[in-house]
Image (cartoon, rainbow, N blue to C red):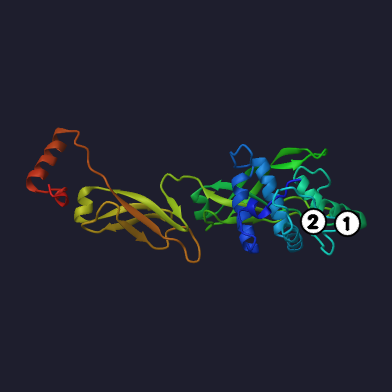
Amino acid sequence: MEFKDYYKILGVESSASEDDIRRAYRKLARKYHPDVSKESDAETRMRDVNEAYDVLRDKEKRQAYDNLAAGVSPDGGFQPPPGWDQGFEFHYQPDGEGDPHFSDFFSALFGGQQRRRAQQEHFRARGEDQHAAIEVDIDDALHGATREISLRSMQPDAHGQPQIRSRTLSVNIPAGVREGQFIRLAGQGQPGYGGGEAGDLYLEIRFRPHARYRAEGRDLYMDLPIAPWEAALGASIQVPTPGGTLEVSVPAGSRNGRKLRLRGRGIPGDPPGDLYLVLDLVLPPADTDAARQAYKTLAEQLPFNPRRNLGV
């Protein structure tokens, strides 16, 4: 039997803290979850990640695993010695022998004790937490919304074979939610064992592309087209914002790409984000005789060399 390096699977050092292990698991779960992953081996990789996390997040399992790993032969061959797990009380998420969610390696280490304990008492355990990513509109983060979402997950059928199952949930998107934030749905994870409570479902928020805004944290950015004379001379212009149309002053001498900050006009929060207007200088097209003549007059009356810094 091949020894499985659970630390390597999660991409952490053997000295990793509980928080490090939790963060690594969530990152890999987002990468290999069947709802979002396009990897050909996503199902196998997700099983390995779940298995590694199941062991390393539990103090007793982790200590027993570390003790065992210290004596592994360099040639890779492995067989757990008799009685290696004496003195440890593990907190299981038991699935039975031959469960597709765990490898033979895991079953060889923890399956025997799991079955012995199940025979000794009515075993109760909390279900596993699950993670999924959902896309929402920036408008949902601005005002809040309730959305119906469909999720898929791998679950064993009555014969223990993995099957893709779908379900629809009604999710409250609170105003002020940020991209990358997790919404916790209590009791919507994997069912518990032996009457134990279900795990939780964590939904990672992602924003769909918006026609007007782009988000960075709680701040919003919007490209604001302006005419050359508005940039050169300054102007007061009407600007649509999430809270309604505002009159905004463009300072004289503004350059392309300059940012104008509107405090508190971003995504709600404590404190709320800001709205940044990124000036986008737009040139009128020279598509009529009058327009071409205007450009010629400007060139004659306003000598200007945009390449002077190049020495030409």
Label 1 with label 2: CB-CB less than 8 Å: yes
Residue 309 located left or right of residue 142: left
Give how far across and how far down residue 62 sits, in percent: 73, 60
Tell me the residue at 63%/52% (across/down). 8
Identified by mark 2, the residue type is: Tyr
- Would you call the spot at circle 2 few (<14 residues within 10 Å), some (14-19), or many (20 or more)? many
Q: In the depicted view, which residue is nearer to us: 8 or 45? A: 8
Q: Which of the pair 181/275 is nearer the observer?
A: 181
Q: Which residue is mark 1?
A: 117
- The type of residue carrying mark 1 is Arg
| Mark earlier in primary sequence (1, 2) | 2
Q: Is residue 232 left or right of residue 267?
A: left
Task: Identify the residue shown where x is 19% and y is 36%.
Answer: 286
Mark 2: secondary structure: loop
Give 109 or 187, whichever is nearer the viewer. 109
Gap in angstroms between the C-alphas marked 1 and 2? 10 Å
Q: Residue furthest bottom?
A: 270
> Where residue 98 sits in the image (x, y, percent)?
81, 43
- Of the pair 258 and 138, the residue shown nearer to us: 258
Q: Please tell me how many numbered marks the rendered image carries.
A: 2
Tag 1's secondary structure? Answer: helix
Mark 2 lies on residue: 92
Residue 94 appears in view:
no
> Could you tell whether 247 is left or right of 157 in the image?
left
The image quarter containing residue 289 is: top left
x and y, in percent, of residue 165 in the image: 71, 39
Residue reaching furthest to the left? 300
Mark 1, other Cα within 10 Å: few <14 / some 14–19 / many ≥20: some
Q: Report x, y in % for residue 294.
A: 13, 41
